[in-house]
């Protein structure tokens, strides 16, 4: 099996599209009132599904997992945080050195975490 689609349950797909359009720098490839889809790379998609429309209904709360975005330098982590602040997004973790690398965390409108990190070398 090759996982190729991550789906987040969201309160408002339209509001989430604004966040992910800005974060990813691209338009959704599909959008309706209750669903939107972004290409993350040539093999992986990110779906945003209206929580009230999910079938079968599921328990859903943002913040219990993360989307990780790998960058090449510490400066890119700092630049991401600057962009988040300029957009009014929360900074849940300021740029920090951790065992796995240099990292920072924000959250989308539903509390789903987005971590940008430069992996530890070696």
Image (cartoon, grey):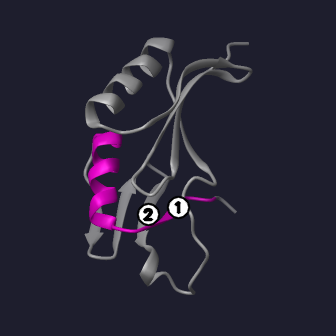
Q: Position of residue 102 (x, y in %)?
A: 60, 19
Residue 47 figure quarter: bottom left
Location of residue 90 with respect to 63 vertically, above or below: above
Location of residue 90 with respect to 76 vertically, above or below: below
Marks 1, 2: nearer the viewer: 2
Where residue 5 is drawn, which disc sits there? Answer: 1
Asked whether the residues under the numbered discs 1 and 2 touch, taking CB atoms below 8 Å apart as contact, a structural biologist would say: yes
From the image, tell me which residue sits under label 2: 47
Residue 116 covered by magenta stretch: no
Question: What residue is shown at x 50% (from left), y 63% (from top)?
Answer: 8
Q: Work out how far the residue at label 1 is from the one at label 2, CA to CA, in angstroms.
A: 7 Å
Q: Earlier in the sequence, mark 1 or mark 2?
A: 1
Question: What residue is shown at x 29% (from left), y 59% (from top)?
Answer: 15
Q: Is residue 80 left or right of residue 21?
A: right
Q: Is residue 25 left or right of residue 67?
A: left
Question: What residue is shown at x 43% (from left), y 83% (from top)?
Answer: 53
Q: Which residues are magenta?
A: 3-25
Say which of 75 and 37 sits in front. 75
Q: Position of residue 70 (x, y in %)?
A: 53, 30
Q: Position of residue 21 (x, y in %)?
A: 28, 48
């Amino acid at each position: 099996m090759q996982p190729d689609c991550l789906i987040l349950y969201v309160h408002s797909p339209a509001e989430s599209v604004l966040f992910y359009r800005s974060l990813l720098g691209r338009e959704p490839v599909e959008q309706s009132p209750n669903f939107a889809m972004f290409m993350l790379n040539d093999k992986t998609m990110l779906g945003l599904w209206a929580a009230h429309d999910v079938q079968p209904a599921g328990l859903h709360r943002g913040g219990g997992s993360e989307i990780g975005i790998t960058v090449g330098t510490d400066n890119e982590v700092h630049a991401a945080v600057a962009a988040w602040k300029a957009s009014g997004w929360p900074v849940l973790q300021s740029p920090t050195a951790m065992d796995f690398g240099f990292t920072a965390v924000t959250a989308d409108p539903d509390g789903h975490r987005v971590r940008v990190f430069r992996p530890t070398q070696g």
